[in-house]
Amino acid sequence: MKKTAEASKTNLVPRILPRGRHKLDPQLVAASQRQRLIEAIVELVAERSYPDVTIGDIVARAGTAKRTFYDHFADKLQCFLAALDGITDTLVAASARFFAVSGTVRERCEYSMRGYLELLASMPNTAKVFYLEAVAAGPEAVTRRHGVQLKFAHNIVALSRSAAQGGEGEELSELHALAVVGALHQVIYGQLLEQGPDSLLGVIDDLVRIAVAFLTVHLPSARSNSASSRRKRTAR
């Protein structure tokens, strides 16, 4: 119930504030200002890249004063990290929903990959900021992005677990799942960089093949790997 109430309150945040005196709740006013500043930095970073955006640019796009910016954020980086947190929450939640469908591994991969790419294509600024610009903001942004990849990996582990129960592969370790995420994200990164957000569905078949291959693989056990290594050392 609390979550629903919070979501309802968020939906009531006014995008445009009335001019002059008004009776709006100060918390709603602050929420509107913060939201506009975050939207502004996402738009500007997608257009120009993170290093080329200034606080002056952000407040001009958001329609606020500089002092308002500093009421919400200590500097440009903190504003960008807040935007990145919102983006990652959206992408991780969507990914979890897409992976939660039933079906074979291939069917689930096709559904989840298509849904995820369609979501990115519908939010081109978000896609550019997350995949192309996050690393430009420095170590904190990179750390956050890695944390998101770990969350994606958890979704992959859950999918592999259900696939293993259906006899289509085996449950992956988190490290293996992280390798899956890295491979998928690298393909998306390359397509965004070279062709742009509108082209993302062009790599759907490649992503599905990669995901299915990773999820249905049967890995040699650690014990057999160790025995093989011993035999090689003995042969030498």
Image (cartoon, rainbow, N blue to C red):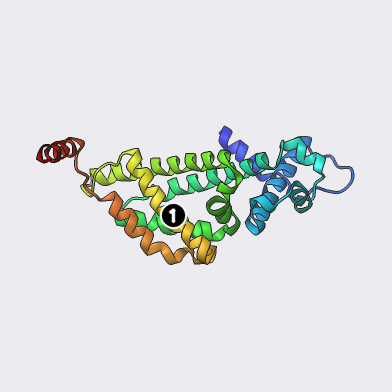
Please indicate whether residue 147 sits to the left or right of residue 129 in the image. left
Looking at the image, the residue that sits furthest to the front is 236
Count of numbered tags: 1
The residue pinned by badge 1 equals 186
- The N terminus lies in quadrant: top right
User: Does residue 58 sit above or below 140 in this rendering?
Assistant: below
Q: Position of residue 65 (x, y in %)?
A: 82, 45
Q: Nearer the viewer, residue 177 or 186?
A: 186
Which quadrant of the figure has residue 204? bottom left
Q: Nearer the viewer, residue 73 or 15?
A: 73
Element at label 1: helix
Q: Position of residue 88 (x, y in %)?
A: 53, 45
Which quadrant of the figure has residue 113? bottom left
Q: Nearer the viewer, residue 49 or 4?
A: 49
Please indicate whether residue 159 sits to the left or right of residue 20 in the image. left
Q: Amino acid under label 1?
A: Gln
Looking at the image, the residue that sits furthest to the right is 20
Q: Residue at x 11, y 39 (%)?
A: 231
Badge 1 crowding class, 10 Å Cα cut-off, few under 14, some 14 to 19, many 20 or more, is few
Q: Residue at x 39, y 40 (%)?
A: 154
Q: Nearer the viewer, residue 232 or 165?
A: 232
- The C terminus lies in quadrant: top left
Residue 156 showing in the rendered view: no
Which quadrant of the figure has residue 226? top left
Q: Residue at x 65, y 53 (%)?
A: 45
Q: Position of residue 85 (x, y in %)?
A: 58, 41
Residue 234 showing in the rendered view: yes
